[in-house]
Every structure is written in structure tokens, then in C-alpha cells.
Image (tube, rainbow, N blue to C red):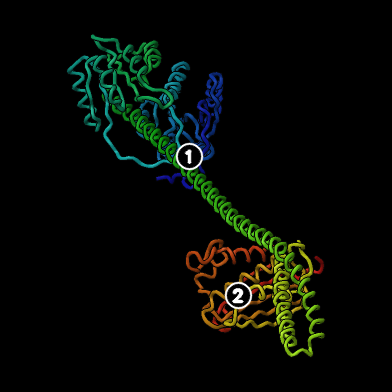
Amino acid sequence: MTADPLVGNAAPVAAAPSDILLVEDSETQALQLRRMLQTQGFAVRRVATAEAALEALNEYVPALVIADFHLPGMNGDELSRQIRMNVRTRGIPVLMLTDERELERQGLESGADAYVPKSAERDLLLLRIKALLRRGEQTPRNVSGTAFRRARILLVDDDAPRRTRLAGLLEQDGFSVDAAAGPEAALASLATPPDGVVVELENIGFDGLALCRALDGRRGTGGDGPSFPIIALDGDGADGSALPAQVFEAGADDLVPGTQQAEALRLRLRAVVRRKLLQDENRRIDAELRERERAVERAHAEAAAAEALARTNAELEAANHQLRDTQAKLVQAAKMASLGELVAGLAHEINNPLAFILGHQNTVERLLGQIGDQTAADPALGPLTLKARQRSQSMALGLKRIQDLVLNLRKFSRLDAGGFQRVNVPEAVDTVLALLTHKLSDRITVERHYDATPELVCSPGLLNQVVMNIVGNAADAIEGFGTVTITTRDDAERYEIEITDTGPGVPDSLMERIFEPFFTTKPVGSGTGLGLAIAYNVVQAHDGTISVGTGPGGGARFTISVPVRQEP
């Protein structure tokens, strides 16, 4: 068997509904047919051989193939078989042309849909072509197989003996036959569309042509509604020139003369039913492809929706993260603002009476000095005056400690300084430690290793906040006695402050979370979880980094690294 030349090639492009592929080796015959078809509005592409036709079918799918039976090389019947064997072209109607009547059977058995003698009248040939194109459909590109089934034929004949004989003949050919004696029963049988309808025109009880018109009216167009071929039987054997035209105009797809009913009916019915079944499969495949396309569109829509949802979730997560950061910054700002108000209030409420007390204390001490000089020789007043002077000096030391505390608060908050400026790091750290004396007390020893350049360009209040939060957490984490070590180091680009402790350290599972806002390992009510989050944001504001690890003694080690700036 000749190999299918279309296997492995790209799918052919569907042509317009009026495109016809003409396979004719005779230049004269081809020219005559081309002119006749073009005058009727058809677009004709002509090739001289079957091999060239197969090559042409690689490029496009015509609406109809008209082929001469006798061709150089591959004959027309083999061309028809090749067309039927290829899944992409098997639905194309094929019209066979030859003047040898005995070749009709061979042409139809090869897969051709119709046979017309070359000597046929022009009008009959055109009607035959239009009958083939009337129900023609384009072949889909991607198909799948279906299960075989017996084709169902509706036989309409009011002659019972003849009806029985024809039904038996068709059943021997493998058809399932439903017989109807008249138009009413035939039209009622269309509730389940048949694969073909055979109408005997020689009837006493009804008009066969009228029934053909009624059946044609029940068929759908463009793939909508039932589709079935109609074969008319010319029972009286008349061969008048008007009858074939009337039959095709009434909607019949084929006409079988009465003189060759038995054999011709079987052959032609096979051809039209085969074509109908192929068209049904094509419609099913088209529907399947459309459903697949819809499924792909739904999948794309679902994927787009999922992507949009993921994008929205990511945006919500980013917004939530930003909200939490903003909340932490607002809390920080509120704390700093509250601290500023507190310091301002303390400065106002303490500095005024402190200045008053210090002024009077100096006066009292000066007067006691004068009295002491006068009463030094008096054994009763001299010791009392000396004791009063000692108490006054002790009061001066206490007042000086109060004055230093207020000064340290002002240094920590830097209410009178904003933005970046040069800060003495050892002095700032010592200020923080002085404020944390109540936490450190005598149980925690602070070791200082100021190896870096003393001055750093930074925000003083924010830097103090970072050191205070870390040292305060270290003091809370150490149970009993321990040590906190503060080390500074720098180079040309980075300035580092390292704070280590001898506490229990930070578990590996929590190192990624300790900088999250509101995350805390302290008991409920003992911490807000904002200290390290604020420290992280402060360092980020300095374009720096803060990391946590394990110190040499097993405790926590925090490393603050910020870029070295030359100017505030």
C-alpha cells in the first residue's frame, strides 16, 4: 500500500467553502472545467497528477476534490484512498470523472463520494457539485477515534413487498433498517436522526419529491440540527432530462436509476453513509476541540485568577508587614515623645526646686562656715556646728546626683538635638548604663572595650535607644550574677558595637523571629515585644545591620554595624 504522504507534515490550512482542487492531466479538459467552475464563483486550483494533488493537500484543505480516474502515475481511485486514509483530509468530498461506466463501482469503492461522466451536461455536473458542497464541512485538525456502529437507514416506500426486499438487501450489507410506508411515519422517525434516508419516488400514496423537500427542511445547516443524506430511487427507470435536476433541487443527495437499483443502491448508500459518518465524527471532534479550548481558557482564567490572588495576598502581606512596621515606629515615636514630655516635665519640676535648694544650701554652708569659725573654741557649739557642716556637704552630694540624673536623661533623649550629628560613643553608652543602674545593680558587671574611634556620626537618641534595649534585655535574661561586655571597633567603612552577655542565649529556632514586632519570650505582661523591633528599625534607618548570634560564653551576642559618615 502506498504510504500516506501527509503523515508528519504540518496541518493543512482550511480553504474557503468555494475552493475546489481539480486533478486533471488533460490541458483541454482542465481549461474547460476551470472556466465553467470559475463562472459559477468557484476558486479552482488545478494540478496534473495525483502526486501533485497530495502535495497540494499538504498546504490547504479544499472544499471539494474533482479528480479524473485515469491519471499519469497514481490513478484517481488510489488518490481517493489516500485522501480517505489521512485523518486530516478524509472528510473532503471527492467527485470522480470518467466516461467508462464500468469504473463507477471501482471509483466509489475507493472512497469517492460521487461519479459523473465527463460527457454529462454542464448543468447536471454543476448540480452534482452543489449537492456535494451542500452538506460539506471542513475537516478539523486534531481528531480522535470513535467506536464502530451499524449505520441506521430509514427506508420510505409504500410498496410492502419492494420495501421488504430492499430492507433485506440493506441488512445484508450491515445496515440497520427502519421501514416507513409514508411521509407521516418517515417524519416521525426523524426524532432519532438516521444515518441515511432512502426514498422510493415511484409511490402511489405520496409524492416522493415532496417528501424529499420535507426531509431536506428537517436537516440542520452549518452543523446545527440533524444531518443525514437523502437517496432517491427512480423506480420507473425513467431517464428524462428533467427528472435528475428535479430530484437534486428537491434536496436529494443522490439519485439511483431503477435499472440498477440493487447493486448501485448498495454502492452509493455505502458512499453517502460513509461520508455522513465521517461528517458526524468531524462534528464530534470539532465539539471536542471547542470543549478543550474552553477548558484551556478556563484553566488560563483560573491560573490568572490564582496568580492575581497570589499577587493580592503578597500585596496584603506586604501591606500588613508595612502596617506592623509603621505601628512599631509609631510606638517608638510615642515612647520617645512620652519620654521627651517626661524629661521636660522632670526638668521643669525638678530643676526649679533643685536650683532653689542648691542656692540656699550654698548659703547655709557659707553661714555655717562663718559660725564655725566663731564657735570653734566653744566646747558646746563647736561640735554641733561641725556636724551641721558635714550634713550640709552630704546634702550637696545628693543634690549633685539628682542634677546628674536629670542631665543624663537629657543626654539620652537629646531633646535639644535632632538628626545626625557627631556623638561620643563611649559617653553615650556610659549614659545608657547610668540610666540602667537599677537593672544592673551589683549583680551584673559591665566590661567596656572602646577600641574604635570615640566619635560617630549618627542620631544620638536612636543609638541610645538601641543600646538601652539590648543591654536591658541582657539584664533581664541573666539570672543571678553575670557579665555584659560592650566592645566597639571600626575601619574606614564600618563602625561596630558588639554587646555580649553570659545569659542563656537565643535558641536557633528563635533567631529569625526576635526582631519581629510584638514577638517576646518574656512572660505575659513583662514585655511588649517591641524593644528589638525598634532596635532593628533604628539600625535600618542608619543604613546598617543588626545580627544576633552566640557569644563566647554561650550567651547572646548582638552586633550593630553602621556605615561611617564623615559629615552629619
In the rendered view, tell whether residue 296 sits above or below residue 46.
Answer: below
Q: Answer yes or no: is residue 224 visible.
A: yes
Is 289 situated left or right of 458 in this image? left
* Front-most of residues 119 and 187: 187
**Which quadrant, please, contains the N terminus?**
top left
* Residue 426 percent across, percent down from the top left: 73, 77
**Which quadrant, please, contains the C terminus?**
bottom right
In the rendered view, tell whether residue 555 sits above or below residue 291.
Answer: below
Where residue 438 is drawn, which disc sits there?
A: 2
Q: Answer yes or no: is residue 5 visible.
A: no
Identify residue type, mark 1: Gly
At x 52% / y 64%, what residue is drawn? Answer: 519
Is 204 situated left or right of 74 in this image? left
The residue tagged with tag 1: helix, strand or loop?
loop
* Residue 78 percent across, percent down from the top left: 42, 38
Query: Dot 1, crowdedness within 10 Å: few (<14), some or many (≥20)?
Result: few
At x 69% / y 60%, what residue is drawn? Answer: 345
Q: Quadrant of residue 43?
A: top right
* Residue 217 percent across, percent down from the top left: 37, 17
In the rendered view, tell whether residue 70 sits above or below residue 178.
Answer: below
* Front-most of residues 305 and 256: 305
The residue tagged with tag 2: helix, strand or loop?
helix
Q: Quadrant of residue 198?
A: top left
* Front-most of residues 292 and 325: 325
Where residue 160 is drawn, which disc sits there?
A: none
Q: CA distance from mark 1 to mark 2?
A: 111 Å
Residue hosting label 1? 73
* Mark 1 or mark 2, whichever is nearer to me: 2
* Residue 118 percent across, percent down from the top left: 45, 23
